[in-house]
Structures are given as C-alpha cells and as structure tokens.
Amino acid sequence: MRQNSQQRTLMVGSTYPAHHGQAVAFRSAIRCVTSNKRVLETSFKAPNRMRSALLAAKYSLSVLHARAFYRPDAVYFLCSRTRVGFLRDLWLLTIFRNSAARIVNHLHGSNFREFYEALSPFGQRLVRWAHSRVDRHIVLHESMMDQLSMVADDEKVSVIENFVTGDCATVPPNSTTPDQRLKLIYLSTVREAKGIYVLLDAVRKLATDGCPVELTVYGDCFGLTQSEIDAEEKRFRAALRGLPEVTYGGVIHGEAKFEALERADLFVLPTFYDSEAIPLSILEAMRMGCAVVTTRHNVLPRLLDERNGLLVPVRDVQALAGAISHFSEDRAHLLRIQRHNRELAASRFSETRYQKEVLEAIHGGALSEEEPFPPDRAAS
C-alpha cells in the first residue's frame, strides 16, 4: 500500500439529503481524506423510476471503472440495511473481492441484524460471503458491535462515536426563567416512526393540563416518492390544527440550525424508528445547551442517562408529557442538565476526533506525522 499521503481512497456513500445525519457524517469523512480520493454517490432517489435506474446503472459502471482504472488502496463505504441496498453493496464487494484494497465498512444504523435475520438462509450466506471481504467495520457505539457479529469477529470492529460539527464552537448559557414557557425543539424527519405525532399529542395534553409549552418543529416530510411526501405533509398539517403552541419551521441547517437549538430549552425526540442509532441532532442539541427527552429505544439508553435528560417508553404520550412537565416545573434541574450537556458534548463529541479516528481506520493504523489533517470545521 502507498504511503498515507499518496493513498488512493474510494469513498462510497450518500450525501443526500444534505441535512440528514448520515449524509453529514459521510461528508465529514470525505473532508478528512485530504490525499487522492474519489467519491461514488449511492442515493438513487429521483423523480421517476427511469431516472433511478439510470443512477443505479451509473453507480455500477463507476464501480467497475474505479476497479479497473482508479485502483484504490482503500475503499470506504456505508453499508445498507435493506435488500435492495445490499445488492449495491454486494456489487461493490464482489468487484473488489480480489483486489489489494483495504475495505472499510461504516455502519450508521442499528438494524443490520434485523435485516440479516429477515433473509432466507441463502440470503444470509450471501451477506456473510460479501462481508467476509471487509477488513475493518466501524460502529457508532460499543453496544452496536452485536449488529455485525454474524459477519465479523469483535477484533475487526471499531467503535467511532458520532460528532458535533464545528459550527457551534462558542455556546452561551441558556437563560430561560421559571415565568417563561418552556421552549421545545423537534429537529428530525417528519415521520411517524420518529415520534412526531406522539409529541404533538403530548403538547396537546400539556395545554389541557395547564402546562403550556412552545414547540418548534424542523425537518422535511418523509417519503420515498413525491406522492408519499405529499401525503405525509398533508397528515402533518392536519395534526397541527388546534395547536397554536406549535410552529413548523421547515428544513433548517448550518448556522440557522444551531441558532434554533440555542434558543431552545429542551430537545425532544420520542423516536421508535427501527434504525435509530446515535442521531447527530441529539449531540448537536447537547452541545448547544439543551436537555434531552427521548425514548428507551435501541442504543439511546446506553448513550444517555439522567445526567443528560429523561428517557421515556416509546409511544407513551402520558410519560412524554410528564417528562416535559417535570422540566417546566423544575428549572434548576433543567439548568444543571444543560450545563452538563454543553461540557460533555464539547469534550467527547468533537468532529476533529471523529475525522482522525475514521482516517486511521481507512489507513489501517495511526496517522504519520506527514499526513495532512483538516481542522475542525462546519459541514458544507
């Protein structure tokens, strides 16, 4: 393999939608590779099936071209957890099976095992065969190592925690007073599995119980097709009726996102999304001084505890309303958690640390002194 500064790296993943956590993380990984690199886009989402098919064909040909002419020393890819997405991974891993390239897989979701166990015995053998070519796997948390136990020994799996981008280097303290309404923020995709409708029901219950709050919702409506997106938006708009306490701010990112988090007291994500792992939005909210209310779901109870906020059962409107009400009534407790979260996120979840660890995984060892490394900076 070439020296680090000369290494050719093929990076395979999706940068779309730009504001989604996995896309933000992939762009950060792209930026940390300052030597020769080539990026292959794996999102085939398009206005129609013909365009999607053309994007898939382009990807397939690009993999062949990279193997024959680019000849990378390392291949870094984000594995899929769906049947169709696995075909994309299978193609990549088959084409590079007999190459000398170091192959690194970065798992960002927490439902790879669920995907694997739903396959037929033949499908499971195919997954094991494909991933046997991977030299190094990356997961976001130690508790996620079990997701890959059927395709890799623990020695081949590294833990690299997610990060907070460099946009929020300086964070002033939150200043909510007891006589002000608690300011809540929801920053995620608008879809049922993320818990948005549970949250709206909780806000409605709080208003009925005499504990009004202010909620601002940011995010795009989910759908695989435009008709599904339109249907989700129609449902969401209908759910907002009779809730003057709730404001919808659409999609937000960059500096505006961190300013919105700075204005909030409480970040609320009552998710039961099957692939939920470590949402970047939670780490960003902590860095900007928000306490967190989320669910006891997947990795989240291992990432967060009572020092960071409160965790509630999934789909439990009453428990969610009770957690929000607690912070409305006990502002001293809220302030202690906000201070703790700011300090924890700043020290533990830096983008510089994330990029360094990803780069070392790609190279297969510690960086050389000559290896250029980008400073901590905002996602583009």
Image (cartoon, rainbow, N blue to C red):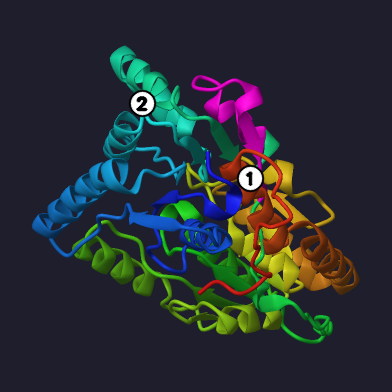
Say if 165 sits above or below 112 in the image.
below
Label 1 packing within 10 angstroms: few (<14), some (14-19), many (20+): some
Magenta region: 143-161
- Disc sitting over residue 98 in the figure: 2
The quadrant where residue 100 appears: top left
Q: Amino acid at mark 1?
A: Pro
Say if 355 sits above or below 143 in the image.
below
Residue with the mark numbered 1: 313
The quadrant where residue 211 appears: bottom right
**Which residue is found at the position 41% from the left and 25% from the top?**
116
Q: In the image, residue 12 lies at what x, y percent?
A: 39, 49
- Circle 1 sits in a helix, a strand or a loop, which is it? loop
Horizontally, residue 242 falls left or right of residue 125, namely right
Report if residue 164 is visible in the image: yes
**Which residue is found at the position 49% from the left and 57% from the top?**
26
Q: In the image, residue 327 lies at what x, y percent?
A: 78, 67
